[in-house]
Image (cartoon, helix red, strand yellow):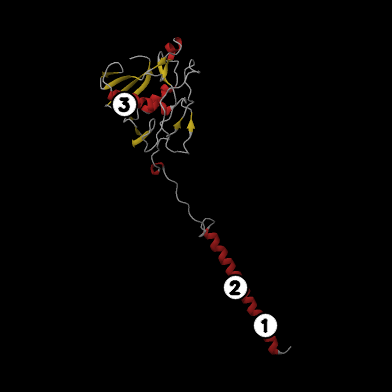
Amino acid sequence: MTPHHRNRLIARFVLLAIVGAFALLRQEFNGQRNEEAGPTDHPNIPVAESAQTPADLPAERPNYEIIRSKKTSHSPESSNSTNSSPDIAPRAENQNAPVAEAQASEPAVLATPKSSSPGQLTEIRRNVFRSAAGLTYVPSQPDGHRIRHVMLHAKDDPSKKIHGVFDGDQEQILAVIDEAFLKSRKTPEGRDVRIEKQNQRRVITVRLDRRIGYVGGQDGKRQRHPECRFLRLVLESDDVVVTAYPTKSM
């Protein structure tokens, strides 16, 4: 081997050694940087937005449910009788509304937005509802809402001495209340309408000349649940419903 070839070979080995040493130094340097950055400092991992605090959440609104009951009389004596509640206009389309029994222990406030059909309600303010006849249902204590209070008369209450019980489902009950209210506005007091004042309230009793419910409670059971053909409506401020229930007399 000539001296020229030997010098070229030595120069090549020196160059490879320098390149290898540089690669090792670069790898060690990158490893130190990764250790300093830590496992959570990855630039490609997005940072999740913080969860909303309770103060950021919108105010909870009541869940308005459509309540239907079996369209048979509640009276144990009337299984063979015909339910004579008024015809109800078709409900506004609401395919997603849940269905429940009207005899639930805690009837829900119901509303069909922008509706004027008998038995349906329109929300005119937050949690304040108006019927097709112009009656207003508002929140109240202890039941939470006047509609819930009225719907307590959708089933019998044996713990009470006398308890008027409506026939029909929730829409029929609200519709017959509207019917009685409109009749009291158009008919002079007399045989069919009686209006009394109790402090700031008006007690209106209207004869409807057909069965709208029966007498329940302890006395009603002893009397074999006589039918009711009158509706008693208690109002304040002319059109705000306090309660309504069937009764068998003026």
Q: Give the image location of residue 81, x and y in percent.
A: 48, 18
Question: Where 113 sits versus 17, above or below?
Answer: above
Would residue 31 be found to the left or right of residue 119 on screen?
right
Would residue 133 be found to the left or right of residue 35 on screen?
left
Mark 3 — residue? Answer: 182
Q: Give the image location of residue 146, x and y in percent.
A: 36, 27
Mark 2 — residue? Answer: 22
Quadrant assignment, res 84:
top left
Disc nearer the start of the sequence (3/1): 1
Tell me the residue at 31%/26% (across/down): 182
Kind of residue sitting beneath label 1: Ile
What's the distance in space between the residues labelled 1 and 2, CA to CA?
A: 19 Å
What's the distance in space between the residues labelled 2 and 3, CA to CA?
A: 98 Å
* Secondary structure beneath label 3: helix
Question: Where 130 sits versus 44, above or below?
Answer: above
Kind of residue sitting beneath label 3: Leu
Kind of residue sitting beneath label 2: Phe
Mark 1 — residue? Answer: 10
* Secondary structure beneath label 1: helix
